[in-house]
Amino acid sequence: MTNFGILARQGKSLATLIAASGSFLIGMILPLDIWSKQTNTSIATVNQTTNNTVNIPTSKNSKNPENLEVIKIKSVVAKRVNKAKQKLRSLELQTFNFNIPKRFEGETIKEAALKRKDKVIALTFDDGPWDEITEKVLEILDENNIKATFFVVGQHLNRRQEIGKKITEAGHVIGNHTWNHPDQSGKMSEDRIKSEIGRTAELIYKITGRTTTLFRPPGGVLTNGLADYAKERKHTIVLWSADSVDWYYKSPQKITKKVMDKASNGGIILLHDGGGPRDHVVQALPTIISKLKKQGYEFVTIPELLTIKDKELHQQELAKKVTQQE
Ligand SMILES: [Zn+2]
């Protein structure tokens, strides 16, 4: 892509962000206005609410009408703010989510172990897109306001292009998981390697308009030449630290336990939304999410996880420099 193309895209994203901010403000005012009409309050009175000088007419049927009405306003505003925040975050992710910090270019990672107290973890889904399953996974993620990373198989994406599009439109990240999913350990021919990765990358770009430098070798195999080829092209090889083993175990309870046993701060969870029947994954997902939330985890995409790790490493390097100078 030319520099001009990139600039044009960034300009477009910026315009979208500004537009979103505008609708955010309108959204803040709108429910108050509607509410004011319902209670016969003048707009002037409603405007005063922003200065914390609420003057609301009392209702005959309620014990504490003023309190009730203030609560009503607060909850409407809170809902609107939350929705606008989500919208802005997803726009932000659409613009920046594929950027990987330089230090992870050409590296292989299994996790990004973090020292900080705020716990984060990355959900990753392999081998899709798949009929019904991927969309169900997207729904669950959306309900929980979670962004994840999908390592797609080219031939599956080719057959389900609309579902693939939905993944990035919802603010999730796509990584390359080859065209045919070859997981043999023996060396593959250069032509085959090129086509497995290149063809998938081209299709991802065609469907989503995005390029990705995240590569997950099928089966986690690092010896057949696929990972080497991707590394040479500055891709980050993304493995995992918490395997759900969902391709083997069909019990939602079992795969939930597998994930929870290995969950860690900065960890990467491996799940599958495609490549075979995955109903048990859909069944387990809400429980996995709620258990991790209870343990204080926030969910991040792989680029977000690597950015957090990059910052932590940067701070450690700075602290080291300071100690050396002292
Ligand atoms: Zn796979």
Image: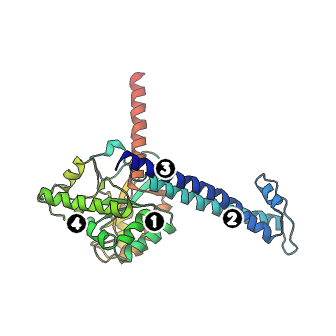
What percent of the width, then of the height, locates residue 50?
76, 54
- Number of the label disc, if any, that sits on residue 181: 4
Q: For the residues marked 1 and 2, what is the alpha-carbon distance in whole angstroms?
A: 27 Å
Give me the disc on residue 76: 2
Q: Is disc 4 in contact with disc 2, using a CB cutoff of under 8 Å?
A: no
**Residue 279, image quadrant:** bottom left
Establish if 91 lies above or below 232.
Answer: below
Mark in front: 3 vs 4 = 3
Which secondary structure lies at badge 3?
Answer: helix
Q: Quadrant of ligand 1?
A: bottom left
Residue at the image position 86 percent from the left and 71 percent from the top? 59
Q: CA–CA distance between discs 2 and 3?
A: 33 Å
Q: Secondary structure at mark 2?
A: helix
Write down the residue under mark 1. 289
Give the amino acid at mark 2.
Answer: Val
Give SS at disc 1: helix
Residue annotated with mark 3:
11
**Marked residue nearer the N-terminal end (4 or 2):** 2
Foreground: 158 or 225? 158
Distance from disc 1 to disc 3, alpha carbons, whole Å, reads 35 Å
What amino acid type is highlighted by mark number 1? Ile
Assess whether mark 3 and mark 2 are in contact (beta carbons under 8 angstroms).
no
Label 2, residues with CA under 10 Å away: few <14, some 14-19, many ≥20 = some
Rounded to the nearest whole Å, what is the CA distance between mark 4 and mark 2?
Answer: 48 Å
Return the disc, 3 or 4, that comes first in the chain's sequence: 3
Q: Mark 3 vs ligand 1: CB under 8 Å?
A: no
